[in-house]
Image (tube, rainbow, N blue to C red):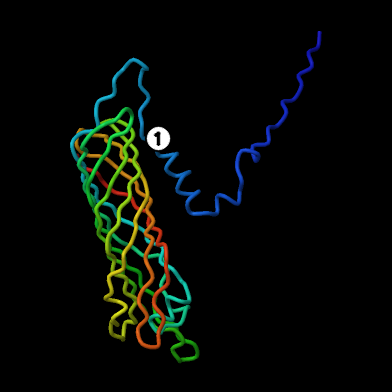
């Protein structure tokens, strides 16, 4: 007796998302944080009460900032657009104290500091310099409010804060201008997760955006444009 097995019909999963939405930074951040939420919270029995997160946490991350190549930014420093550096390196440090828990959310207060740097080398063509070497730096500090989801073994979070930033873009053979020293109000927001393999030491990831206010025009140069700087990082957490 022969049995005929009908082939399974392929399921088209493209209906579950809009590919254009993935191009927007906010959508990418939402998807990343959702994935971290699922991975950071360990599975537990329904009747088991998860242990609380704890009283505080300290984070130290190495980061990869993606600096803008905006033409208005170049004009604000008297540079050509092709002289602006791109992706750089940096460091992020933060601290949070957890003040209360409401249902599944633990509320934290703290602050963070971000230092980022990128450098482009000079470009020569037929012995003539066609692009100067430029160093770009970004320094930001702000208080932070965080919403945390999980328990002491691992948790994800969303956080945001407002504070001053200093954004300098200076040729290696040049000098800083007033625009490079100006303090720009910056709104930082993002999310991440922490996993603790030991009682007090863990691994953490963070994805953050810095919405930088426009700069003040200096003489005949325009001010730097309103810009959003993207920074991704990973490192250690101590609680």
Q: Is residue 34 above or below residue 46?
A: below
Q: Position of residue 96 (x, y in %)?
A: 22, 44
Task: Name the residue located 42 percent from the left edge and 83 percent from the top edge.
Answer: 79
Task: Name the residue located 43 percent from the left edge and 78 percent from the top edge.
Answer: 74
Q: Position of residue 188 (x, y in %)?
A: 34, 56
Q: Is residue 153 above or below residue 74?
A: above
Quarter containing the N terminus = top right
Looking at the picture, tell me which residue is in the foreground, 141 or 169.
141
Task: Name the residue located 43 percent from the left edge and 89 percent from the top edge.
Answer: 129
Task: Name the residue located 46 percent from the left edge and 87 percent from the top edge.
Answer: 130
Quarter containing the C terminus = top left
Q: Is residue 166 above or below residue 102?
A: below
Q: Position of residue 19 (x, y in %)?
A: 61, 48
Looking at the picture, tell me which residue is in the foreground, 84 or 218.
218
* Location of residue 222 by image quarter: bottom left
Residue that protrudes farthest toward the right in the picture: 1
Q: Is residue 222 above or below residue 16?
A: below
* Location of residue 97 by image quarter: top left
Q: Which residue is mark 1?
A: 39
Looking at the picture, tell me which residue is in the foreground, 127 or 73.
73
């Amino acid at each position: 007796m022969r049995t005929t097995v009908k082939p399974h019909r392929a399921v088209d999963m493209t209906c579950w998302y809009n590919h254009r939405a993935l191009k927007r930074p906010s959508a990418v951040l939402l998807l990343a944080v959702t994935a971290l939420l699922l991975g950071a919270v360990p599975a537990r029995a329904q009747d088991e009460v998860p242990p609380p997160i704890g009283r505080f946490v300290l984070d130290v991350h190495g980061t990869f900032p993606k600096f803008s190549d905006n033409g208005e930014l170049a004009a604000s420093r008297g540079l050509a657009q092709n002289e602006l550096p791109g992706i750089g390196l940096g460091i992020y440090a933060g601290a949070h104290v957890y003040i209360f828990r409401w249902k599944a959310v633990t509320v934290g207060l703290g602050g963070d500091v971000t230092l980022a740097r990128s450098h482009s080398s000079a470009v020569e063509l037929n012995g003539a310099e066609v692009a100067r070497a430029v160093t770009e730096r970004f320094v930001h500090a702000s208080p932070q409010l965080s919403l945390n989801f999980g328990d002491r073994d691992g948790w994800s979070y969303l956080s945001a804060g407002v504070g001053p930033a200093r954004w300098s873009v200076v040729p290696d053979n040049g000098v800083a201008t007033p625009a490079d020293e100006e303090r720009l109000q910056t709104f930082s927001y993002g999310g991440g997760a922490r996993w603790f393999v030991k009682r007090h030491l863990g691994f953490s990831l963070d994805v953050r955006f810095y919405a930088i206010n426009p700069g003040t025009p200096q003489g005949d140069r325009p001010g730097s444009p309103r810009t959003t700087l993207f920074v991704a990082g990973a490192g250690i957490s101590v609680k």
